[in-house]
Amino acid sequence: MTADADRVLLAHTGDATVAEKLRTTAYMQYLRRSKAGPVAVGDEWLVVVSNGCGRTTQVTLTVRVVDGGRRIGPETEIEYERADE
């Protein structure tokens, strides 16, 4: 069995408001559960971020770094940076 990654760095296409939403505890738990399993540099995920009042924004997340294993697990630390950095 493959070990869980210690850390995954994701690049996002959103603005500062989207970045704030992505960093919430609830959203990171959602990603750990919905993307649990194998992960590799270059993987892309189209996700939806809530803007409140039923409004959403689609965001592309691209895996840039995977440290310490090859799977996203319940303890994997998730970090973000803007896709244009």
Image (cartoon, helix red, strand yellow):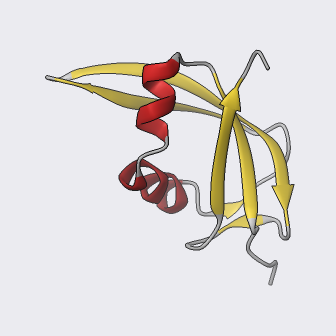
In this rendering, the answer to whether 54 lies above or below 6 is above
Q: Position of residue 69 (x, y in %)?
A: 83, 70
The C terminus: image quadrant: top right
In this rendering, the answer to whether 13 lies above or below 42 is above
Q: Position of residue 52 (x, y in %)?
A: 20, 26
Q: Quadrant of residue 5?
A: bottom right
Which residue is located at x 73 percent, y 74 percent? 4
Q: Quadrant of residue 49?
A: top left
State the residue lying farthest toward the bottom. Answer: 1
State the residue lying farthest toward the left. Answer: 53
Q: Quadrant of residue 10?
A: top right
Q: Position of residue 7 (x, y in %)?
A: 74, 60
The N terminus: image quadrant: bottom right
Out of 31 and 18, give the one closest to the viewer.
Answer: 18
Specify whether 66 is left or right of 73.
right
Specify whether 58 is left or right of 55.
right
Which residue is located at x 41 percent, y 47 percent? 24
